[in-house]
Amino acid sequence: MKALRKKVYMVAGYNTVSMGTGRKEFHPKKPRPDLEHYIKEAGQATLKMIGGAEKVDEGVIGNFMASRFNKQANLPAFLPMIDEGLKNKPAISVEGACASGGLALASGIKSILAETADVVLAVGFEVQNTMKAMYGADVLAGAGWMKTRKDGHAYFFPGVFSNRAGAYYEKFGKEKTREAMAKWYCNAIENARLCETAQEFHNKSKDLEGTAKMPLNPKKFVDHLNYSDCSKVSDGASAIAIVSEEGLKNVGIDPKDAVEIVGIGQAASDITQEPENMTCLTTMKAAAAKAMEMAGITVDQIGTVEVHDCFSIAGIMGAEAIGFAEEGKGVDFVLEGHTSRCGKVPFNTTGGLIGWGHPTGATGVHQAVTIWEQLTGKAGDAQIEMKEDRPYGMTVNMGGDDKSLVAIVYKRGE
Amino acid sequence: MDLVPKMKNVSVLGAAGKMGSGILVLLSFEMAKLKIGKKSNEQFVLNAIDVSQPALVNLLGYVRSQLLKHAEKNIVELRDWYADKENLVDNEDVINQFVEDVMAMIQTSTRIETTYESELIFEAIKEDKNLKVKLFSQIKQNNPNAWFLTNTSSIPIGEIEKEAGLNGDIVGYHFYNPPVIQKLLEIIKCDNTGDELNEFSIALAKSMRKIIVPSKDVAGFIGNGHFMRDALYALNQAQKLAETEGWAKAFFMIDTISRDLLVRPMGIFQLIDYVGVDVTKFILASMQPSFPNETLSHSVLNELFDREVKGGQYADGSQKDGVFKYQKGRITHVYDFGTGKYVSKEDIEMDCAAKMGELPTLKIYWKTVVRDKNKAEYLEKFFKELHQIDSVGANLAVAYGQNSKAIGQMLVDTEVAASADDVNTVLETGFFHAYGPINDYF
């Protein structure tokens, strides 16, 4: 599809705190807010900004594994819990592992395009601190093919991306790659410190580089990654309203306070197959290309990116997959500072999955909220300057090991 | 060294106690390594023996919880151990199977006869030489090849060996509390201890990843050799101070000095409460015969014991009332030995501070200093300032540090410890001190 058949906007984004290790208020043994709390907090905040539940035609909830983390299913029925004004309105939930949030956005966009709705409330959430990490790893392994679980690592996904990192080291050099991964971590934490909802907001460490360069410990963790290379285990929710032109008028929001969706690319690849190329996120590449093609832009016009850095190596390979660098050159792109907040294309300006946090089902929505904030000047201390020749923002949300992908291109409303 | 032949059938005497339960857990980890990790086809049995049946039931709950923690921590390795078990897919499956498999090796018993089948007998019963001798000699008569590893912290191994007729089949294996966490292990060979047993005991300790410090077979060994004399010194100092200040203030001040000004994790009287006034008294009594020229007892300690002011811990690990009363681990009241009543800490705190007088302006805390890489530098500055101050508090602290150093030096001079480093290792790892007693600060 060359272009969207009608204008689609996003407005009124909201992120709860990303709760988990790193937050001062987090204590693994003390009671914490539940999934009901997070869904309500995010959903109600967005409803408030758009003038209430009566403005909403449909709702969509993105979530990965509430069925196991919280033993909860039938998630569409949580929509009316947000506000009784949503009772009897259509609601669905979508799941695509860590791309569940992105899929919720895609679903909402499709409702607008299908003209079944002018205003869709999209909420993504995950509450995963209900389990210790080694049991959570079992649950998250569901994002991979279950038949490979037995031979996989105890920490299944760190194991999967450790293998990718190992392949990358071998092909393009370990030392420089580790340098770039350390830089990725430092950028993530420095950005997270500017965003009060970020999980690493309270991180006061004076030696981030030292943390990132700790020796690898394959006996207790994986072969090629450190903890600092990994995203966080997080509880949180994000919400945003997806609206048509008509819907934008209905909610009474100035287009300048909205972002317009100018391109979307979705792609899925066979979960039962091993990656065709260990050092390239090929499905991400396809999704990003589709989104840019639809938007009619090149990477040189993109001013900021929220990329799915579930692991630092995925962030670097993501920069390559989108097209900012050739395969193997993403490390230089990062090391030269292009992804830093003062660089050419600031990536993950509030910390991304490593710094802000990764409430899996919420992440895709969180990325959209961050881009909406940046493009409309609402990012507070984390605000970056958008340059005229790079007016577009992009989000890339990935489920599993390059399996379910959603890439979206945004520009500020006019 | 192949541990398997000796590890197939092991007994722990006093398994339900504080030390015994920890030793049992450590041994269960070791058996798991041999049975599951190395896929041995041998049958392994770990006998948990104690006089109290209800305590053994509680023990199994404790062991299970420790195994679960251990499995969670070592899941990377465990998945490897169970790689050929196709039905165990999730980490949770592997962890649960591990706990079940190890629990299946543990058998509880209240009968001493159970040990007759064992190659190894670990002992962690109370500090009573006659009881140990009686049990060991009975076992030896029925199980002539058994090796004995005793957790005594004070009784000379050679005396037990001789009196029980053990033919050199005993070694001192002194764990620190709690054994699962504490890295230190004092190994005490007596004159007759066989080489094979000695070698085995070192190999096992290494497999348990313990920090091994050898100690000469002299009552109290290194750890209690220092601690007991340190405690007696503190009691004497408190007694002197009590003449003018009263007992509550005296206890409180010496405790504060030994903690804050010596930069230790807890004050000396809190440590006595933690160990137990009763246990401290037993240890001293068991050491006394070996040191006829020293007085290893204290009238105040004996009197506290008689008055049932005993300290020690409840089953849940919380502290019983002793020299102090505690709330959530913090001192709230102090025992006034003169009146036999507890006094609120708040009521004496200010007076004590005034009496102690000037203290170093540089404030350093054990908690922050102990893991700081610039630890030596902070300590040096702090103690330098302490030496320059002429106040009651500073003078008592300096004298205390000097006495502690003298005890340490004596342990080296009398060859209880092979070196100053060994003394310092015991105090730093076994007692969590930020620095060893043999140092240049005092």
Image (spheres, coloured by chain):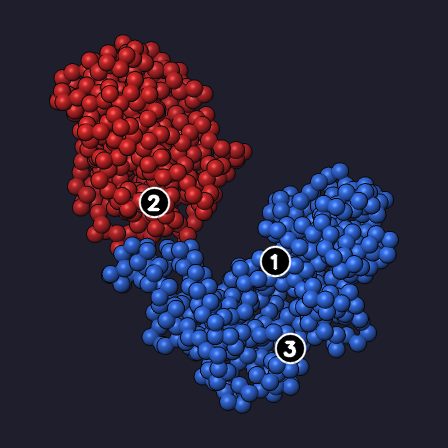
Chain colours: A red, B blue
Please state the horizontal and vertical placement of residue B104, each as a whole percent of the image: 37, 71
Q: Is residue A232 visible?
A: no
- A359 left or right of B292 in image: left
Q: With respect to residue B203, does B117 lie above or below?
A: below
Residue shown at 26% from the left, 15% from the top: A251
Residue bearing the label numbered 3? B128
Foreground tag (3 vs 2): 3
Please state the horizontal and vertical placement of residue A140, each as a whole percent of the image: 29, 45
Residue shown at 76% from the left, 47% from the top: B348
Q: What amino acid does circle 2 point to? A: Pro
Q: What amino acid does circle 1 point to? A: Gln
- The numbered mark at residue A158 is 2
- The numbered mark at residue B319 is 1
- B194 left or right of B260 in image: left
Q: What amino acid does circle 3 point to? A: Asp
Q: With respect to residue A376, does B351 lie above or below?
A: below
Q: Is residue B86 visible?
A: yes
Other residues around mark 2 within 10 Å, as few (<14) / some (14–19) / many (≥20): many
Circles 1, 2 touching at the beta carbon (< 8 Å): no
